[in-house]
Image (cartoon, coloured by chain):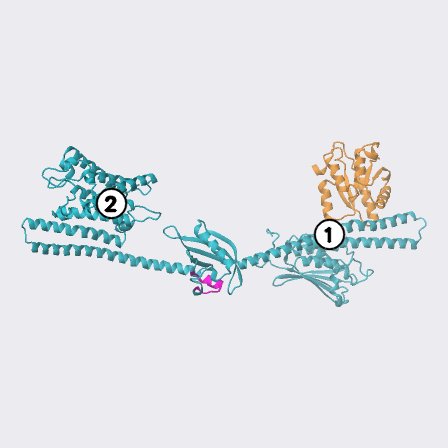
Chain colours: A orange, B cyan
Amino acid sequence: MAALKRILLAEDNANDIELTLSALAEHNLANEVVVVRDGVEAWDFLRKSGSFAKRDGANPAVILADLKMPRMDGLELLKRIRTDERFHQIPVVVLTSSREESDVIESYAIGANAYVVKPVAFHEFIEAVKSLGLFWAVLNEPPPDRGRAPVTA
Amino acid sequence: MTSLIDRIPRLSALWAIVAAILVLLGWQVNLPLLRSAWPGLVSVNPMSAVCFAIAGASLWMLAPANASPRARLVGRVLAALVLLVAGLKLIELAGGFSPAVDRWLFANKLTQAGEPRPNRMAPNTAIALMAFAAALLTLRIGAIRRARLPQVFGLITGAIAFAALVGYSYGVGAFYGLTAQVPMSLITALTLLVLSAGALHTEPDLGILGILRSPGTSGILARRFLPLAAGLPLLLGWLTILAERAGLFEPTFGLVLLVLSTIGIVSLVVWTVARDFRAMDEARIRAEADIEDSRAFLDSIVENLPSMVFVKDAQELRFVRFNRAGENLLGYSSGDLLGKNDYDFFPKEQADAFTQKDREVLYGTEIVDIPEEVIQTRTNGERILHTRKVPVLGADGRPRFLLGISVDITERKRAESHIVALNEGLRARTQELETANRELEAFSYSVSHDLRAPVRHIDGFVDLLAKHLSATLDDEGRRLLQTISKSARKMGALIDDLLAFSRMGRAEIRKSTVMLNAVAGEVVRELRADMNGRQIEWVIGDLPPVQADPAMLRLALTNLLANAVKYTRTRPLARIELSATRGEDEVVVTVSDNGVGFDPAFAQNLFGVFQRLHRDEEFEGTGIGLANVRRIINRHGGRTWGHGAPDRGASFSFSLPDNAGGADGGSQTNPLG
């Protein structure tokens, strides 16, 4: 089995973090997850600055980002990732409670790779997280010279 | 360009100067012909000749209407000089002192051989010269153009000269020379006549000349009869005398001949004048009829104009004309208004303002436009007028009338301010609505995001708990956890439905032609997937195309048909019928079934949000479906209603406005549909 790439989970709600982690754990993906609590931390992580100045390793294989977070929300984070050439190839999955059409449209417009509404039923949630994690972290290993992100394609 | 008429004064001045020079030359070189024009006739006195030269120069200076002040002064001084010299001569004749001005020049030559008396200035010459000088001195005094005095004096000069000429031609000395005095010479008579013509022509448009030159009847009369009166008797008399002297006929015969020919020629001229006058009369009558026609035409225009038209005289600003619209507007009849001015109808202050404005109009050059003017009428209360005032000028360029045209814009103003107020209100309402809408959106966003999360967490942690306790959990424990989980999911479903319902109210409707048959077919196919072996008889009638938002209509149809499927679950053979009828201006779609039905007492409640007539254990659901249907149909401008009885089936209908055959030609949001 290929070495698993890291998953970056940006989520401010502790309950959601726990549920997501346990869902990922069911599929043996949990130990590869880095949790950050808002957009600013996620951005720090990516740029290896702030509390992540000393981290090692490459970019995460996939970023799961909540839309509504303090300090910097998911849309702003997504915007920055897509306009920075060091990160714009990283797949980003928007993971949120919101079903609002405007959120969906805007997320895709900025260049989200997927938009997943967190289902109320936990087993559905597990299924969603599982397929996300497997697809982006294991199956869909991006080649280094992969084409540009959808927003600029 | 100066016309010949305008040149006459200076030409005659030139004549006088040249004649004077010739005469003086005649005295100087002893050439009698130069100073008498005819052998044997009396010579022109040298001082008279000098007077002609001075008078000519004066006329030359004063003749142009635009002569400079300096030229005028010089001209007047010269005229005064002539007046002085001639006056001294007359004083001498009257027996006063004797300066003998006429003997100052060529004194030694004045007494000539063969002449009975020494050459002196004739008394009538002196009078004529004084009259001429007076004509020049009275020319253009003051600011107003007048020609009476110069022309009267000019005529006196001319009359004296003419009398002398007649005397010469008839050989009657009394007419050119007074008894015991030297007579007026022929050259003097001619020169004075020419100077008189010059003086008369200094103002050729005024007075006697004005009449003589006018194109009208007065001019014709003067031009035909003056030469006749002056020339005919002269000519005929002269011929008669010549004939008598030649001994052709007796004096009495000559007189009769003179009388008869005078009668004949005068009658002839009178006849031609009368004939011309008749032609002119006819033309005038025709012109008057034309004027009357066009006056009646203009009258009927003015009277029938819907705007108020009034005319005031320029002097006192009294009304001289008022049309019918004006009478109606102000509430006065023309009779009340004519001859009155603004002070008779309006308060003094307002009348002052109107009058001042009117004067500005009259003496200004531009049309005055008063876009808004409030006036108090007698019968119509306060009115707002848009008035335009125009000065009407006379032929002399001075204002004669003030024409006013007023449009009553009261209603328009009222409507405008009403519209402004309405718009103001509308803007405020729109703002309120927009604010409310924004708040609603923020609210549903927050519901969507914040309310769903805890519900999701409950379900998630119940699941984690169940796994955590899997070894020790008994059946009752599992059931309890399942109940918690079910409730959480139910709450999630309710929130989702509520949000969808709210979105339905806010989403924009995009109408196009929807083939109801096709949509119904698709919905039925989807529903069949969840029927797991149930027996359902579908009866789908002939459905017409309708104008609607396709996605929304599909949702409404899905809700109704899904309900029918759900509430026929207890029937061994379900029967679901979908039909449509086309009314005059709407299409009514009905879904009916043979299911469990409902108590018609609660029929109205069915369409409310989360209103249910069945327990959840009997038929699951959130109770949002019919509320959604009603909201969708309402937003299309249609109605929804339901019929039913317990255990006897139910039928639900909605109507959609049908303007496919209507006048406005169907969809407005989809011009291609």
Which residue lies most toward the front here?
B97
Identified by mark 1, the residue type is Glu
Residue B132: which disc?
2
Point out residue A37 in the picture as x, y percentages from the top left corner: 82, 41
Viewer-closest of B97 and B165? B97
Q: Which residue is mark 1?
A: B439
User: From the image, which quarter does the N terminus of chain A lie in?
Assistant: top right
Q: Which residues are magenta?
A: B320-334
| Left/right of residue B426 with respect to residue A89 in the rendered view | left
Identified by mark 2, the residue type is Phe
Residue B351: which disc?
none
Point out residue A24 in the picture as x, y percentages from the top left corner: 85, 42
Point out residue B112 in the picture as x, y percentages from the top left corner: 12, 37
The answer to whether residue B55 shows anywhere in this view is yes
| Chain label for disc 2 | B
Viewer-closest of B137 and B548? B137
| Left/right of residue B67 with respect to residue B233 in the rendered view | right
- Hey, which quadrant is residue B505 in on the image? bottom right
The answer to whether residue B408 shows anywhere in this view is no
